[in-house]
Image (cartoon, rainbow, N blue to C red):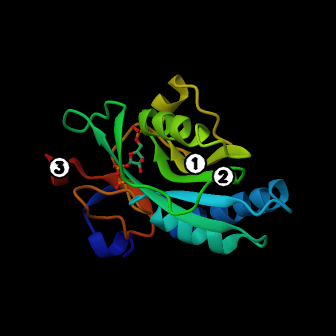
Amino acid sequence: MDAADINGDLTEVLYTEKQIQERVREIAVQIDEDYRGKEPLLVGVLNGAVMVMADLYRALTIHAQMDCMAVSSYGSGTQSSGVVRILKDLSIDVHGRHVLVVEDIVDTGLTLTYLLENLASRNPASLKLAAMFRKPEANKVHIDMAYVGFDIPNRFVVGYGLDFNGRYRNLVDVGVLNPSIYA
Ligand code: PRP
């Protein structure tokens, strides 16, 4: 679906499908260069990362593999607490692999802080992060984000993997959700 299909649900489109796809291709070019000859393992964090994983992985011209993890963060309401439980672990052993974690968004950074620590303990050859969107809070935690699509404002955004109650992940654009939807 695109923004026109959900007329009224968004107050503003932040990034169109075209802009997102262009940015994904730019990041893929960088990853191609940085990982040439290394056959990286892309690790997607379900569910939000499905869209960027599918697009980024296909945009690469080098050999690469992919796997996914599912995590759940314990928190009160919409706030992430940083306590993360692994619901689905990787199928591929990351020991000695060049791991690139792929995320849709880094907000408080708590999920990623846990995840990167967990993956680092498995002794990968290298460990980096690619996130399509980054919110301002993310800058407060020390996470080295090798590849970032867009820095976005601290607003309720949906689309391209980002959901509200499971909806809008399949929106090809990214926009600000109308408060009337979640009020
Ligand atoms: C989102 C997103 C990240 C995390 C970022 O996942 O995909 O994993 O939140 O938030 P943080 O930086 O504040 O920790 P969510 O838990 O909403 O699950 P989802 O991917 O299934 O939407």
Which residue is nearer to you in this view: 9 or 114?
114
Q: In this rendering, is residue 158 above or below 2? A: above
Mark pair 2, 1: CA separation: 21 Å
Judge left or right: residue 66 versus residue 2.
right
Amino acid marked by disc 1: Phe
Could you say whether the residue bearing mark 3 is in a helix, strand or loop? helix
Q: Give the residue type that dot 3 points to.
A: Tyr
- How many tags in the picture? 3
* Along the line of sight, the residue nearer the viewer: 167 or 1: 167
Q: Which residue is mark 1?
A: 150
Q: Residue at the far left: name it.
A: 183
| Cα separation between marks 3 and 1 | 24 Å
Secondary element at tag 2: strand
Q: Quadrant of residue 81?
A: top left
Element type at mark 1: strand
Q: Earlier in the sequence, mark 3 or mark 1?
A: 1
Mark 2–mark 1 CB contact (< 8 Å)? no
Q: Which residue is mark 3?
A: 182
Mark nearest the camera among 2 and 1 is 2
Mark positioned earlier in the residue sequence (3 or 2): 2
Which amino acid, mark 2? Answer: Val
Q: Is residue 26 visible?
A: yes
Side (left or right) of 42 relative to 10: right
Residue under label 2: 99
